[in-house]
């Protein structure tokens, strides 16, 4: 029996036993990781360099890309390295750092998506007051509140999780350190305090979700009143990418944390973790740039500039 005080490392879930499958896992994760790095990196560069994109919507999008880059970089490289070196180990501090960063970045992203819903609501339902309400200082404060809330939530969850005595071994049934999987290693009922904190967090998440839904009900009501088809198309093209990103993020994360234990299995948990930790950061840049003419123009100009220099 091992206590958390004597634990020096955890063992993560191995994707495969044979060398060929380990290398396949490494190659697959590397491809997804590079796609996420490229997509989010291009958006950050385009928004930072093009003054036409220095607006609240793109400021929040830049923050979203930074959070996506951080979240995928927290989980995927360690899993790739383990497959490459044929090991499952992660140090105790490394595991604590993963838990902290995963909670911090995903919570901050969720709060930021809530702020972005408010930004879309003001832009479409109160266009005449948009510049007043969404001034530079207000936008910076909202973004800082999202990052700060994520940080505070992460401190609470990480401190709580790693203060619990662990006596069920050190094998984590996931490819990164995830709170529900670490709680499975706890002694008897000592996990109840962290479970209580998770319930409080779920209520906060639900509150944000209700706010996003109500914002979009009002947005779509306002859009349908717009007389010109071109105006409606422009409004929808502003909102649908954000709605798609929110749906993808919320559905995968809620299924991961709220699915009943009766349908829980190591393979299903693994698939769900891949879905919520890797799919949104990789697809978000694609979703935002697909219907966005301004962003596509900025990316095109940036690529042409690079080509001219060479």
Image: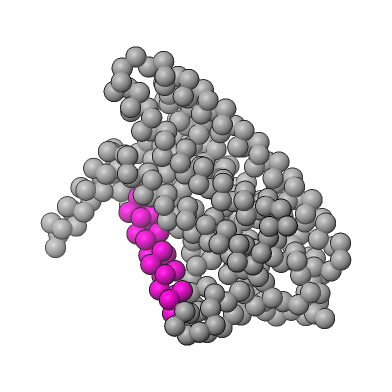
Q: Position of residue 61 (x, y in %)?
A: 42, 44
Main secondary-structure element of the magenta-colored stretch: helix
- Name the residue located 48 percent from the left edge and 64 percent from the top edge: 73
Magenta segment boundaries in residue numbering: 23-44
Q: Nearer the viewer, residue 80 or 105?
A: 80
Query: Magenta stretch: residue 50 in it?
Result: no
Decide if residue 273 is in sight here. no
Q: Quadrant of residue 295?
A: top left
Quadrant in the picture for residue 235: top left
Residue 87 visible here? yes
Would residue 47 be found to the left or right of residue 1 on screen? Answer: left
The quarter in which the C terminus is drawn is bottom left
Is 7 rendered above or below residue 286? below
Say whether residue 28 is magenta: yes
10 sits to left or right of 141: right
> Observer-nearest residue: 135 or 41?
41
Front in this rendered view, residue 56 or 198: 198
Give the left or right position of residue 111, taking residue 19 as reference. Answer: right
Q: Position of residue 142 (x, y in %)?
A: 54, 38
């Amino acid at each position: 029996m091992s206590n958390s005080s004597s634990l020096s490392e955890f063992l993560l879930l191995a994707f495969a036993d044979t060398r060929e499958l380990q290398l396949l896992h490494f190659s697959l994760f590397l491809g997804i990781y590079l796609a996420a790095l490229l997509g989010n990196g291009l958006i950050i560069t385009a928004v930072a360099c093009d003054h036409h994109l220095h607006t609240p919507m793109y400021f929040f999008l830049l923050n979203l890309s930074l959070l996506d880059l951080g979240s995928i970089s927290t989980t995927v490289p360690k899993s790739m390295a383990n497959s490459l070196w044929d090991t499952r180990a992660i140090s105790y501090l490394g595991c604590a750092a993963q838990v902290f960063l995963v909670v911090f970045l995903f919570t901050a992203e969720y709060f930021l998506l809530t702020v972005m819903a408010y930004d879309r609501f003001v832009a479409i339902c109160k266009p005449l007051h948009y510049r007043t309400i969404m001034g530079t200082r207000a936008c910076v404060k909202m973004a800082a509140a999202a990052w700060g809330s994520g940080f505070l939530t992460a401190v609470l969850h990480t401190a709580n999780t790693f203060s619990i005595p662990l006596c069920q071994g050190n094998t984590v049934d996931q490819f990164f350190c995830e709170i529900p999987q670490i709680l499975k290693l706890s002694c008897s009922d000592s996990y109840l305090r962290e479970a209580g904190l998770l319930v409080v967090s779920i209520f906060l998440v639900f509150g944000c979700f209700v706010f996003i839904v109500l914002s979009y009900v009002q947005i779509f009501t306002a859009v349908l009143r717009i007389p010109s088809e071109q105006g409606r198309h422009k409004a929808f093209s502003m909102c649908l990418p954000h709605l798609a990103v929110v749906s993808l993020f919320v559905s995968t994360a809620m299924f991961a944390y709220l699915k009943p234990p009766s349908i829980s299995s190591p393979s299903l948990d693994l698939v769900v973790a891949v879905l919520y930790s890797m799919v949104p950061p990789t697809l978000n840049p694609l979703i935002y740039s697909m219907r966005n003419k301004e962003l596509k123009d900025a990316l095109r100009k940036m690529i042409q500039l690079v080509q001219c220099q060479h």
